[in-house]
Amino acid sequence: MKTQNHALSSSAFFTSDIDYHLLRASMVIIFAFFGYQKWFDYEAQILIPYIGNGPLISWMYPAFGIRGASTFLGVSEWTTGILLLAGFWNRKLGAAGALASIATFVGTVTIIPFMPHGWAESAGGFPAMVGNVPFLMKDVVLLAVSIYLFKQDVLRLASTTFTEQTK
């Protein structure tokens, strides 16, 4: 068993950065598709309960209106996706994209406790997610991925800077 574990752990899959690259690529795809939706009226209407109840993002309706807020989010999400994509070649841009991604998902995760009708009164003595809340729960994982990417980019930037300084 030890031999198998050692062989597996020393394989290219486990010694490469494939996890980092897969997570970055996944986030680029998510921001591309979610950003694309924001350009259409149907999505602007769907976002009303989310933006309207978001303690960190509800300011967008008075500032931009319903369609303007949706467009603002679309531009923001595409910008974040482009920065994350650029992170494959430039750690500073990747870190900026990961930081923007963190801000995005902090904004959406904070909606969860404020979503009207988001929790059933009781499911065996414990509140159960209903309505829009289960959709938002995925953002907890996406926030964790964003933090991981930011951490990796900062660490890689620091090690590159250290290597350059010691030459």
Image (cartoon, rainbow, N blue to C red):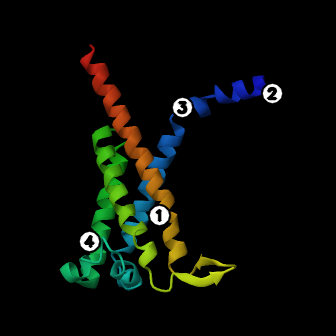
The residue type indicated by label 4 comes to Phe
The local crowd at label 1, few if under 14, some if 14 to 19, many if 20 or more residues have their Cα within 10 Å, is some
Residue 139 tag number: 1
Circle nearer the N terminus (1, 3): 3
Q: Which quadrant would residue 79 be assigned to in this image?
A: bottom left
Q: Which residue is mark 2?
A: 1
Quick one: label 4, few (<14), some, or many (20+) residues within 10 Å?
A: some
Q: Along the polypeptide, which appears first: circle 4 or circle 1?
A: 4
Q: Nearer the viewer, mark 4 or mark 1?
A: 1
- Name the front one of labels 2 and 3: 2
Q: Residue at x 51, y 46 (%)?
A: 22
From the viewer's side, name the closer residue of 88 and 69: 69
Q: Residues within 10 Å of mark 2 (few under 14, many from 20)?
A: few
Indicate which label's residue lies in the foreground, 4 or 2. Answer: 2
Q: Are marks 2 and 1 in contact (CB under 8 Å)?
A: no
Q: Earlier in the sequence, mark 2 or mark 3?
A: 2
Q: Residue at the spot x=66%, y=78% of the render?
A: 125
Q: Earlier in the sequence, mark 4 or mark 2?
A: 2
The mark found on residue 16 in the picture is 3
Toward the viewer: 161 or 84?
A: 161
Residues at marks 4 and 1, CA–CA distance in whole angstroms = 19 Å
Image quadrant in which the C terminus is located? top left
* Residue that label 4 marks: 72
